[in-house]
Image (cartoon, rainbow, N blue to C red):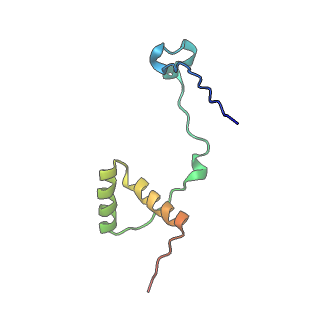
Amino acid sequence: MRTTIIRIRTKVKNIGDKPMEPEYDLSKMKRRSNPFAKQLKKQVTIYLGIDVIEYFEMMAQEEGISYQELINLYLQDCVTSGRKLSVN
């Protein structure tokens, strides 16, 4: 039994080939906040050591993100991996 492969060529059109239609002009769009954002994060106040803050600020600057976001990413990684701290 022979299998025949048929290749169909289609021309991929770049988005930049023609100007955006006037009805899709996003520059006139009104900004609104994400209605689900409050469900995703909660603001808390915690006291951190100065050395901890400086460490995360340095790492965040290397990554080009805020240190708060970096701390959140690190803690989220702890949650997803089930990492436990040994306090002895």
**Residue 23: which quarter of the image?**
top right
Of all residues, the one furthest to the right in this rendering is: 1
Give the percent coordinates (x, y) of residue 61: 30, 51
Give the percent coordinates (x, y) of residue 38: 58, 49
For residue 10, above or below residue 68: above
Give the residue drawn at x 45%, y 18%: 16
Give the percent coordinates (x, y) of residue 70: 41, 56
Of all residues, the one furthest to the bottom in this rendering is: 88
> Where, quadrant-wise, is the C terminus in this rendering?
bottom left
Give the residue drawn at x 34%, y 66%: 52
> 84 or 34: nearer the eye?
84
Give the residue drawn at x 54%, y 27%: 30
Of all residues, the one furthest to the front in this rendering is: 1
For residue 35, above or below residue 45: above
Left or right of residue 7, residue 74 in this image: left
For residue 7, above or below residue 20: below
Give the percent coordinates (x, y) of residue 39: 61, 51
> 40 or 32: nearer the eye?
40
Give the residue drawn at x 57%, y 46%: 37
**Residue 34: which quarter of the image?**
top right
> Where, quadrant-wise, is the N terminus in this rendering?
top right
Count of labels in the image = 0
